[in-house]
Amino acid sequence: MSTQLPQEPETESEPETDAETGSQQARRMREKAERRERTRTEETPDLSDEETRVIKVFRYDPEVPEKQEPRFDEFHVPFEKGTTVLDALIYARDTYDSSLTFRHSCRQAVCGSDALFINGSQRLGCQTQLGDLDEPVRVEPLPHQDVVKDLVVDMDHFYEQMHAVDPFFDPDETPADPMVEQSQTRANREKIKTSTRCIWCGACMSSCNVAAGNNDYLGPAAINKAYRFAMDEREGSEKKRERLEIIERENGVWRCQTQFSCTNVCPKDIPLTEHIQALKREAVKENLKFW
Amino acid sequence: MSQSYNRGLVEDFGRWREFSAGMWAWVFHKFTGWVLVGYLFTHIAVLSTALSGPAAYTGTIRTLEGLLVVRVLEVGLLAVAVFHILNGCRLLLVDLGVGLERQDVSFYASLILTGAIVVASVPTFLAGVSL
């Protein structure tokens, strides 16, 4: 759409004779009819000779009075080995209902946009093979977050919690020469390696029973973020103390009840519970200094 | 955003079939914990009969042990206590950060061990004590 915009003023400014206008209009009408024909045939694709799967998608649109009551729509989508849930959703949107709304971007589990509640579990749509799931595949927006439209949830609260732990470096001293690397040891890198993989998809927070009942709880993702910096040897000692103070507050690490829900659903296989437990021990060590 | 839809608790107990090992361990640990707290009160009540003299205490114990229901409940109490102890040890390991990637195995192990101990204790409990 946006690529066509600059052309419009050009055609308008061109001096046109009546004949030209007539022929252009006829051409435009012809193109429009062709396009309509094309979309019409696309609307009823013949899937009879193809293997198909059924997906049931949660639908809700607060702006259309008829769609304010949440419902499930069924879509029949073509299936071949390798088809993901996101592929199915894209097909359904492009083929059947262009109003079907969901977030997606990279399609390779890097952007973290398409965390969905698929067959009762939080998963990334792009990472989940349709072939691994029982039919009909139920696709719902993430639980415990408000639904904005269809599969889109309000992520503001999740981002607030992520920012609450000050997710940035604040070393005690930086090298005078800005060209000097601030490197860490290999062992330290290994320690924080998995925690750096977080893609902010929100699956863990959505799966956490404690976070569901307590909106003030930082949640697994934010605590993992705190772990990533607190355990980094380059972190400044003053900042580390501040960070531990944040996470050991009433709604910090101590709310974790080790249900392992977050660890089970994390699409990047981050051992979230392990990191939360490690920070609990750090917090205790910080407060119990006998030496 | 004009409006948003709150679906409430989607992941409530209606989804218990989808609970994972860690979730079940938590549910059972909470449940057994509350049962043990409740038992503590009846325990104190029964023991307090000793304040009225040895005869009253012996009489109370004899009456209680004479009831089949009480002996069956004692088997349940043992099951609850054993699971709470074993899962408590599991949680201790979790807190120490030992073997978190195998926490589901330790949960199943504590369940099986609880079952074995309880089954083994059934004859002893149902026979009752001969005072």
Image (cartoon, grey):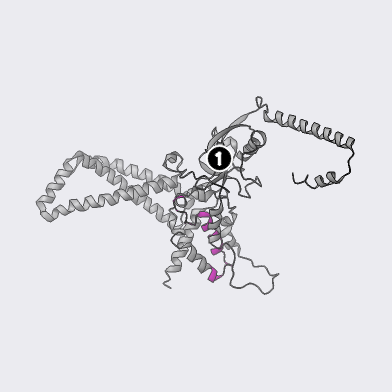
Would you place residue A165 above or below residue B27 in this image?
A: below
Q: Is residue B120 left or right of residue B5?
A: left
User: Which quarter of the rendering shows the N terminus of chain A?
Assistant: top right
Between A63 and A107, which is closer to the camera in this rendering?
A63
Is A289 magenta? The answer is no
Q: Quadrant location of residue A41?
A: top right
Camera-nearest residue between A284 and A37:
A37
Determine if residue B81 is in view: no
Q: Quadrant of residue A173?
A: bottom right
Of all residues shown, which one is farthest toward the bottom?
A: A176
Residue name at image x 23 percent, y 42 percent: B125
What residue does disc 1 label?
A: A60
Which stretch is magenta? A212-239
Q: Residue furthest front?
A: A18
The front one of A273 and A201 is A201
Q: Position of residue A231 (x, y in %)?
A: 54, 63
Looking at the rendered image, the quarter that the C terminus of chain A falls into is bottom left
Label 1 neighbour load within 10 Å: few <14, some 14-19, many 20+: many
Q: Secondary structure at mark 1?
A: loop
Residue located at (40% from left, 53% from top) = B91
Q: Is residue A79 left or right of residue B3?
A: right
Q: Position of residue A287 (x, y in %)?
A: 43, 68
- The three-letter code of the residue at mark 1 reads Tyr
From the top left corner, tell me how far across and down residue A146 is, in percent: 52, 47
Q: Is residue A183 above or below residue A158?
A: below
Residue A234 is a magenta residue: yes
Q: Residue at x 61, y 41 (%)?
A: A101
- Residue A54 left/right relative to B53: right
Expressed as whole percent of the image width and height from the top left, the position of residue B61 reads: 16, 47
Label 1 marks a residue whose chain is: A
